[in-house]
Image (cartoon, rainbow, N blue to C red):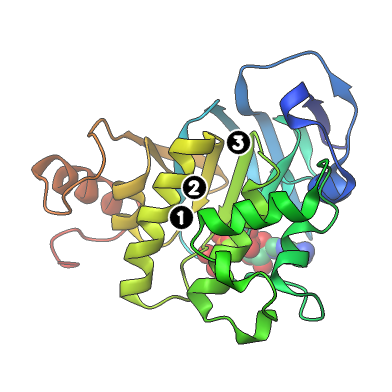
Amino acid sequence: MATRFRRTVTAATAPSAAATGAARQAQSGSTTAAAEVSELTRTFDGRPVLDGVDLRIEAGEFVALLGRSGSGKSTLLRILAGLDRDAEGAVEVPVPVMVAFQEPRLLPWKRVGANVALGLDAPDPAAAAAEALGEVGLGGHLDAWPVTLSGGEAQRASLARALVREPGLLLLDEPFGALDALTRISMHDLVLRLWRRHRPGVLLVTHDVDEALLLADRVLVLAEGRIAHEQHIGLDRPRPRDHEALARSRADLLTALGVDPIGST
Ligand SMILES: Nc1ncnc2c1ncn2[C@@H]1O[C@H](COP(=O)(O)OP(=O)(O)OP(=O)(O)O)[C@@H](O)[C@H]1O
Ligand SMILES: [Mg+2]
């Protein structure tokens, strides 16, 4: 059985070809969730990488997903993005869903503003792109070529490209993984600011337990094809890294990841 996708369209999130990519699906009733996944299984060469995943992300909820390398995190994101239709189970997501990857994937032959405006379903795509780039501090780089941007700037442009489409679900696959420590910290602030303003549901894949603890409402661990552990983080943001409650959550998450929390500090 192929994946059963049900995508919900609201006036604020009308689909555009570029935003939905290959994931355009039957549009159906309404859901209050940013994503609803049940019994999701994905097998490669007879080996189940996802093995009955159940997951619900509430509208506007910020969820982080941890898991060992090869545990299936990107596979899950690709299915949610509609980029992989060969899974079994049910997936319900809003339209559009947008993805930002570790590498920003800007088209090198288009200027930064044109990259953000590309395929945008708006009355004035160029103006909308300029506003989105302004929001991420790149208002002065509209006419720049992608090759001239630093890694952090390119990642900010990629976020602007995603958010200008007002996604109901924003998928982030290790978006800060290639950035230096200082740039990562400013990207964390930026992502929180943008999330507060646009309020998409977010699924952030990261290897960085502290990043998950600082940003997310809920942190999940994917192991053996399922969501094996879940941790709610009830603290207000911004969160002090050395908060006692975070230290406890960190230890629990490291244990769920199979890492000795004492030996790792
Ligand atoms: N198209 C594919 N064909 C065959 N195997 C695949 C394919 N895509 C993923 N896999 C396998 O599925 C498993 C999960 O891959 P995935 O990329 O989802 O892991 P991940 O959790 O994102 O890992 P990482 O943290 O290293 O990015 C891996 O063993 C990978 O080799
Ligand atoms: Mg991955």
Instruction: Confirm whether residue 30 shows in the render.
Output: yes
For badge 1, the amino acid type reads Gly
**Label 3 residue SS:** strand
Q: Residue at x 19, y 58 (%)?
A: 261
> Mark 1 = which residue?
67
> Mark 3 = which residue?
53
Q: Disc 2, ligand 1: is the CB inside 8 Å? A: yes
Q: Nearer the viewer, residue 148 or 28?
A: 148
Q: Which circle marks residue 222 in the picture?
A: 2
Q: Residue at x 28, y 60 (%)?
A: 259
Percent x, y of residue 108: 76, 80
Q: Nearer the viewer, residue 234 or 141?
A: 141
Task: State whether residue 229 is above or below residue 154.
Answer: above
Label 2: few (<14), some (14–19) or many (≥20) C-alpha neighbours in 10 Å: many
Q: Residue at x 79, y 61 (%)?
A: 45
Could you tell me if the residues under marks 2 and 3 are in contact, i.e. CB atoms within 8 Å? yes
